[in-house]
Image (cartoon, coloured by chain):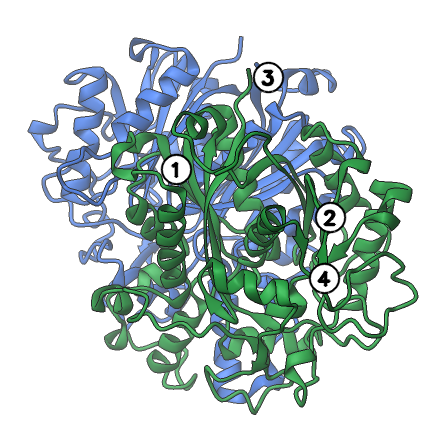
Chain colours: A green, B blue
Amino acid sequence: MSRRAVITGVGVVAPGGIGTKAYWKLLSEGRTATRNITHFDASPYRSRMAGEADFDPVREGLTPQEIRRLDRAAQFAVVAGREAMSDSGIEFDQLDPGRIGVSLGTAVGCTTSLEREFIVGSDRGKYWEVDQSYAVPHLYDYFTPSSMATELAWTVGAEGPVSVVSTGCTSGLDSVGYAAELIMEGSADVVVTGGTEAPLSPITVVCFDVIRASSTRNDDPATACRPFDKTRDGLVLGEGCAIIVLEELEHARARGAHIYGEIGGFASRCNAYHMTGLHPEGIEMSDAINIALKQARADATDVGYINAHGSGTKQNDLHETAAFKRSLGAHAYKTPVSGFKSMIGHSLGAIGSLEIVGSLLAFEQDLIPPTANLHEPDPECDLDYTPLVAREKKVNTVLTVGSGFGGFQSAMVLKKVEGAGR
Amino acid sequence: MTRAVVTGIGIASPNGLGPTAYWRATLHGEAAIRPITRFDSANYWAKIAGEVPGFEAGRHLQGRLLPQTDHMTRLTLVGTDWALRGAGVQPNDIPDTDIAVITAATAGGYEFGQRELQKLWHQGPEYVSAYQSFAWFYAVNTGQISIRHGTRGPGAVVVSEQAGGIDSIGHARRQLRKGVQLALTGGMDSSLCPWAWVAHQASGCLSRNNNPKRAYLPFDRDASGYVAGEGGAIMVVETPESAAGRPGTRIYGEIVGYASTFDSKMPSREPGLKRAAELALRDAGMDASEIDVVFADAAGIPELDKAEAEAIKGIFGPFGVPVTAPKTMTGRLFAGGGSLDVASAILSIYWSAIPPTINVENPVPEYEIDLVMNEARHGKVKAALVLGRGKGGFNSAMVVREYR
């Protein structure tokens, strides 16, 4: 019998609230948590909004040394990791540490800390030869994002395979797909996975400004991200983290664990097209969907809900709508679709994992969170995007997708596991 | 089980561009650690590095690619071209969805990033490059390779510092097992700009000795840290059936075992390198006695050298296997280092020779390892074990073997 990877624990840091409960409350009520940026003075920039997490590291139990050492994204990962560990009910110190792995997604790593330290070392960009005497002790940890996987591995006591997976905006899906592969091939029994991102600093805001990918609806930040709406004008950045405990099915069953669902299938594709552009036909995303469905032994008609990428750009909306139709055919028109970025913004390498967790909670609650801010549907987007209000529906199979700079297209199929009640 | 063979090797190393020049230099023990030329090192305490000389990106890449790429991406794209050429892969030989691209990264396109950060903070947001959104980030090399060669199969990027160069190849083999025919994989790294240099110095791992011959001395009683370098290897790894589809394709060797582990924070726990090596051997279905050479991680830091020597001794016995570290010629190359070591191991098998470790004069006797010093050893190499560690606790091991 082949090995299967199931989710037995989740933890979240998200705009709108810390913890899985607050996250689900926001999603199920269809509220938005995007607002004017408060982390720094954003007045010089074109897009001045983001989904910010109200995260207080002291209140979340981090020690002074952790707070000093860790970039905000790594702090998120530790806090969400602890919630996921506790939620899973696994006694991590009773497991063989060599059978515990970590696979953490992030797109831009510790850029917030790096930018802060660059400003000091270069005296606000005055010197090309950055002054070595201003280097902080943990600068090398910011330099390479693998330090964040180290931190999460220490948190859970992992001594098995540990890595960061960094594929831009699909990192949060790809890291979990990678984790599932580690379990299925037998390299680990438990993999703590997910994605984390705290990208809200000027350099990241500016790099989306210069390519005009972000929304300029600065006077109405709460409704700025409008996927599938004809008034959309771009993405709204976000920050956050979701950590997932992935476990081999029999391992989970043997301890009577609560099982949220199974990673039925996962596939990624390169589009070989453009570093930031998308082809409107959505061929590669559709390929990824087809492979993920096949791995999950699911038919297109089994899909009860599609968790869209929904970044709030026109090219994305057309791209993924075409991909859903290409893969699901007529069934695409009967399947509710929704996009969480309308509520929490686009947290780059974390969002894929936040979307997985939201989709798993939809299983639990028989409730599909809506696409917020969708008042005037774009006629070119003619699927059922679940506007504004959550919808009650029993779902056994969810498709979640992601799309990112570099041409990455990923798809994951999540399935309910029968006989897995708490 | 699906097999994975190496048919193309693209190398950009401080001591040679391309597998032929690199291998000739490496067998002769040609040192390439020199005073830094890429930026003015006067204000930094570390003043030497392994720079790739004579690499003119404009001779290999279209002009439009230059403003949108960091130096490490240029090295990667050219290395990939060479690997594909060596493997004799022509466009349309293989369906585009059957080609995966899996690379390793450490810190992304840092020099590009520094330039844009400086523009933002010194000149203003309107001066920041339109390419900043992707040119520096960790995923860029996989994306750019895919676009350049029109590959539409799986794409991935792993980051586990120096161990990542091995992990990327392990993940590429996983993709072959999942059904793709061919993978472009490995790592090329470069972070030789002032802002990166300050971070390297902060790691606490760089040698403070600026004599190129005395700075990086793994397993030596005078070990004092390592020297940073740039470069790496991109390889074509494919199934034997795929290679057979192009008659005359040279098979350098086979990837037969891989594993990765992580070091606990608790000092009471044994470091994971030995376990990674044992798991990789088990994955290969091989006994330690079948290994003819170990390409060591060779941190050049006394505690880490000791731990690695103990791992090797624990598996092979005292002086039980030749151990070498050609990275003493180039410095440590981060995401590129693990991949270049795997390439070197494959070339060792192909050319029946073990390249030397240079500059080491006084190996610590208690380590009891058979370090291949100064001169290459010639003779049949059937199988090699490659070890890599990444700062923070990452351990990876790969077993490569002659193809038969």
Q: At 51% from the left edge and 74% from the top edge, which residue is drawn?
A: A52
Dot 4 falls on a residue whose secondary structure is loop
Report the Cα–Cα distance between label 4 and label 2: 14 Å
Which numbered dot is residue A305? 2
Label 2 CA crowd tier, 10 Å (few <14, some 14–19, many 20+): many
Which chain contains the residue that carries disc 2? A
Tell me where residue B380 appears, x and y as whole percent: 39, 11
Which callout, 4 or 2, points to the residue nearer the camera?
2
- Could you say which quadrant of the image residue B44 lies in? bottom left
Could you tell which of marks 4 and 1 lies nearer the N-terminus?
Answer: 1
Query: Are the residues under marks 2 and 3 on the same chain?
Result: no
Report the Cα–Cα distance between label 4 and label 3: 38 Å
- Residue closer to the observer: B56 or A57: A57
Q: Which residue is mark 4?
A: A310
**Vertical comparison of A129 with B277: above or below:** below
Query: Are the residues under marks 1 and 2 on the same chain?
Result: yes
Label 1 CA crowd tier, 10 Å (few <14, some 14–19, many 20+): many
Dot 1 falls on a residue whose secondary structure is strand
Tell me where residue A140 appears, x and y as whole percent: 32, 60
Mark 3 touches mark 1? (CB < 8 Å): no
Which chain contains the residue that carries disc 3? B
Which chain contains the residue that carries disc 4? A
Could you tell which of marks 4 and 2 lies nearer the N-terminus?
Answer: 2
Which callout, 4 or 3, points to the residue nearer the camera?
4
User: Looking at the picture, which amino acid does disc 2 mark?
Assistant: Tyr
Could you tell which of marks 1 and 2 lies nearer the N-terminus?
Answer: 1
Mark 4 touches mark 1? (CB < 8 Å): no
User: Is residue A279 shown left or right of residue A4?
Assistant: right
Mark 2 touches mark 3? (CB < 8 Å): no
Report the Cα–Cα distance between label 4 and label 1: 31 Å
